[in-house]
Amino acid sequence: MRLRLTLNGKRVVVIVPSETSLLEALRDHLGVFGVKHGCETGECGACTVLLDGEPVNTCVMLAAQADGKAITTIESIGQHPELGWRRTEGLDPLQQAFVETGAIQCGFCTPAMILAARALLAENPSPSEADVRQALSGVLCRCTGYLKPVQAILRAAAVLRGEPVQSIGAAFLAPPELLSGREPPPESDMSGGGSEVLTRTGILPQIQVTSPPRMWTSVGRPEPKVDAVKLVQGKPAFAADIEMRGMLVAKVLHSTVAHARIKKIDAAKARALPGVAAVLTWKDIPRVIYSTAGQSDPIPGPLDMFSLDEKVRFVGDRVALVAAESEAIAEQAMSLIQVSYDPLPALLDPAEAMKDGAPRLHDEPEYVNFGDSDPSRNLAAHIHIDIGDVERGLAEADRVFEGEYRVPKVQQASIEPHVVVTYWDEDNRLVIRTSTQVPFHVRRQLAPVLGLPAKRIRVIKPRIGGGFGGKQEVMVEDVAAHLTIATGRPVRYETTRAEEFFFARSRHPMRIRMRTGVKRDGTITANEMTVLTDTGAYGCHALTVTGNTGHKGMALYVGDGPYRRSPNIRFYADIVYTNTPPAGAFRGYGVPQGFWAVERHMERVARGLGMDPLEFRMKNTLRAGELHPFSTAWSEGREPRPETINTCGLEECIAQGSAAIGWSEKYGNAGWHRIRGKPHLRRGIGVATVMQGTAIPYLDMGGASIKMNDDGSFNLMVGATDLGTGSDTVLAQQAAEVLGVPLDDIIVYSSDTDFTPFDKGAYASSTTYISGTAVVHAAQKVAERIRWRAARMLGKGGQEAPAQDDIRLADRQAWAPDGRSVTLAEVALNALHHEDQEQIMGVASYVSPSSPPPFAAQFAEVTVDTETGAVTVNRLVMAVDSGVIVNPLTASGQIEGGMTQALGYAVCEEMVYDEAGRAREQNFTDYHIFRSDEMPELQTIFVETIEPSHPFGVKAVAEIPMDGVAPAVGNAVLDACGADVDTIPMTPERVWSALKASRQSSVLSHQEKK
Ligand code: FES
Ligand code: FES
């Protein structure tokens, strides 16, 4: 079809097949990459454009429907403010506001959000917060929690109306003493000027600073992200945003049965189809066992997977790989592959899979064990940890509380699916451009699978549209790579949204039993957790995810008095294969599962003892100066080493969080729990205390390299992988602080195995801490050379040379104590062109001997409809000790987005399989993630401590917001109406059933010992 469009003000003609969607026409035929693919069903909104001024989803429109119409994409809005001698209009106010407020994390949804907002503001220049949330409700964001995008749009509206707005950085430039207890800016700063109350949300997180004043100029500032300007313009920054001549489209044919041997597979008809370049089955490629878990060597888990096997182990397992000239041809080719199966009994329940005589999923002779894995018993991993003497502790208890808790399988649901492009470069090296969190692991792990030495593979990580652990899996790269090897041509493989659900990884579902001994005064004498984990068909992250369920969840409660000095803790776990899609890494990495059980259980114990839940927790939780109880018992399958907790701000977190949510006025106040005129509604308030870790000690390594340019700017090269978290920005801030330059003098290039130093990748909340320390050490080496040279330059012309160590770097200059200075540009010119020439540069790497835990208190306020069991979460307040906060905008964005994901875990997200092992949820209609217009009020409080093992005192922030929301909401539901729910998500049916049970018996389940 020949279509005429007005695209961003220009007339264009495009010729496409009649079945082409508008999304395909824009991306594949017109090279408009600002419009994104997040699904195929019109549910995520990432593909939004304005069609004659109205927002539309292009993935569900035929290109033909746009014939003769005007299309506006992000590419037509705003320009980079610096484009050489040509004056530019700069960024659009909406784009500018998104940059300034920290509304961009991965940036994958940002073009769609800006276009939706543009349509709103064209109609309504003074929108309310509700109007903005409604306008954004068609664009899903998995990163931000929507708070900052809403604020950005209200701010832009104010700018467009000509109203003054507060500088984001201004509040942070206040004298340090004013920072303590700082409140968000007043409402008027964000208001849209209409008649209603427009917003109750502040741009700046409330920060309680428990540390002395600091004089830093970059660390601690709300700097805009270093990639924000590119992302807000929709530049082709993501893995799929690349045009290559002759690029093929890859598809995977998936198994339709849960467990079977492939009796016969015939691809002849598919191969004969015009436009098909290759079809690969298990017969066509080498049989190399590996693990898809992107982890350091040696991978702490079994090797149990092949790129293609003659056996399938879940509905969705790989059967064949296809490469064709177009997606439509690839789909047709898949339908022509004839497969017949020899079915085997399918195991869908981990308890059944462990039974004697159960069919065996992994009988391949190549299987490589790790630790206690035992494929003859369908056991991917087993954990057996005893700290102290649990039996003695239980015997010494006055009461023993028992309970069983369940958590579901849930999906990471990054809006950008997995995507990879592979091609041979001019040296016949294989280039893998991929949306990965672990580029260096991809190269190392795939080399044997592809039959290439690692040195002949280059892995490039462009921007990533969210990962959340799902892209810590080497899951798609081999698909495209095998097809490039087979065809010699570039290949793109991009998963569909349905594949994300039935083929990609997910959070491990678990059944968790708790047994806790307590004295009458609330002292915990022993604490025991027993876990049954369903790892699915492959053991990706099987040992380490469940290990962390105990390692973090069970470490928080050590007891009091003599038990505090010598806690009694038991953690046993079986991680079992079933014929369901494999689970893997998901933000929080086993810890949210653990804290659902631990924090619901502790609430039952506290209430059973008649104690205040806050007081009970503070009596028994870990404190600074104490040994991490698991540090001598377990270290992700490696040798454990003792580790002391240096900092713990939990007590202050509880104080700040409870004050913010009004705990003392609400908890135990019968009047507050009731709502006048609505007897079926009950309010409730709940808390959960949590901890995480910061990297894996003695293992996680990050490298950094910094070189000075002749204008005094710096290239910072890191292997660390920014997946939207802002890690490039906070690493650059640490370099800028050491080098005395503004942030935009640091040019960051991250994650390219050819050009950046090694980094283990983005996981375990480690980048700011591990890679950050490497950056600081590299910057210090650079600073040393600058000081040496500056001292020599200042000593010229008969002047006295200052001592090198006395020179201070600030404001792009090297300062002597007497006030003389040379600019860094002068130092750079001197070094590169004038005198004893050298390239000033520094390289460093860092491995930490410790994993300092962040701590947090999570509060929730809910309303429960006692007639239907429906839970409305009204407010979430999280007070976090993440050490020193390098960037309050990006850090609070992590907390807001994490709390939102965790809220889905609490109340609505769940993956279920039918009796044949088929996934029930395969799209964003059946699998609901929170929309902008459904969000509760979010509040973040940072309680800063100074972690001595990091140069600026930081700890982790990225994962801890996943841990406490579900139990805090569960405890709030209990507080509201007595429904004691043990399984998430807390659907209306589950709450209603628990409510009925609680009415029948208000006695909590426990065993009276004496
Ligand atoms: S709505 Fe079109 S890509 Fe998701
Ligand atoms: S910033 Fe919205 S999906 Fe990542």
Image (cartoon, rainbow, N blue to C red):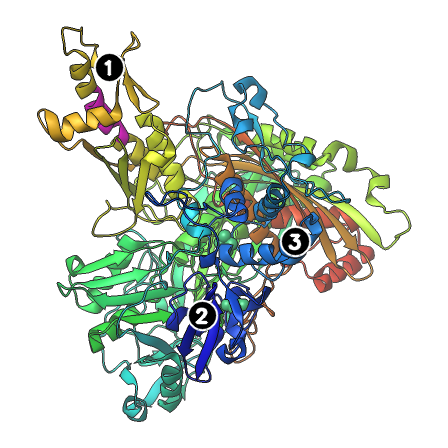
The x, y position of residue 379, in whole percent, is 40, 64
Do tag 2 and tag 1 residues touch (Cβ < 8 Å)?
no
Please tell me whether mark 1 or mark 3 is closer to you in this view.
Answer: 3
The x, y position of residue 485, in whole percent, is 20, 73
Determine which quarter of the picture holds residue 275: bottom left
Q: Main secondary structure of the magenta part?
A: helix
What's under tag 1, amino acid-wise?
A: Asp
What residue lies at 24% left-to-right and 14% top-to-bottom? 805
Mark 2 residue's CB less than 8 Å from ligand 1: no
Magenta-span inclusion, residue 911: no
- Farthest residue toward the right? 677
Is residue 906 among what the camera can see?
A: no
Q: Secondary structure at mark 3?
A: helix
Determine which quarter of the picture holds residue 156: top right
Q: Nearer the viewer, residue 99 or 411?
A: 99
Q: Which residues are magenta?
A: 779-787
Mark 1 lies on residue? 805
Position of 618 relative to 327 (above/below): above
Mark 2 lies on residue? 11
Position of 671 relative to 33 (above/below): above
Is residue 687 among what the camera can see?
A: yes
Q: Quadrant of the C terminus?
A: top right
Distance from label 1 to label 3 (Cα)?
A: 54 Å
Of callouts 2 and 3, which one flags the residue occurring earlier in the amino acid sequence?
Answer: 2
Mark 3 lies on residue? 133
